[in-house]
Image: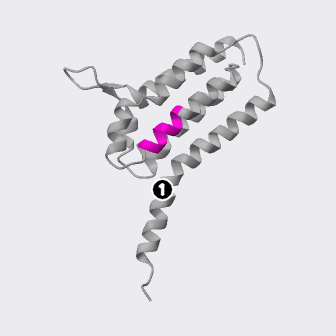
Amino acid sequence: MDRSDARQRLTHLRRLARLFDSAFRIPGTNISFGLDPILGLFPGIGDMASPIVTVLILWHGVAARVPKVVLARMVLNALIDAGVGSIPVLGDIFDVAWKANDWNLALLERHARADSRPTSGDYLFVILCAIVVIVAALLPVLALWWLFAWIARPAF
């Protein structure tokens, strides 16, 4: 990936992270929020949106040679966001304060190294982290599905 292509992708990621975490401000306060807590009001669909942004940031992080420990930290930010964010109402309030995508983008920009190329092991690591993030986001949806199926089963 050449420098102009990397800069362009980073610009798109900045816009996406801002849209999800801090695009709007509550008038008269320093409190900002994005689409993440709004989409979180829709069970299942909203809980999957932010992890998709995380996966995009992680993928770019591998291409930019971000150290694996920093990628792991990004995954941890996303897991906390997905875990607490899946709790109805409380999770949506939490999403206003916990800006995982903004923080992950800041980590990406701070630790990116343009002088080296990613290895297949780097891509494998990010693919595994992406799977973990997606599974963590799907667990609450699957738990609700199981709960409704269990409640709806015949009593005899």
Q: Which residue is mark 1?
A: 141
Residue in view at x 59 percent, y 21 percent? 9
Residue 120's quadrant in the figure? top right
Side of 32 relative to 52 (left or right):
left
Side of 102 relative to 116 (left or right):
left
Q: Which of the image's four quarters has the C terminus?
A: bottom left
Residue found at the far bottom of this picture: 156
Label 1 sits on a secondary structure element that is helix
Side of 71 relative to 34 (left or right):
right
**What x and y, as percent, mark residue 97?**
36, 30
Q: Is residue 87 above or below residue 11?
A: below
Looking at the picture, tell me which residue is in the foreground, 155 or 17.
155
Magenta region: which residues? 77-84
Residue 83 belongs to the span the image colors magenta: yes
Q: Is residue 118 above or below residue 155?
A: above
Residue type beneath disc 1: Val
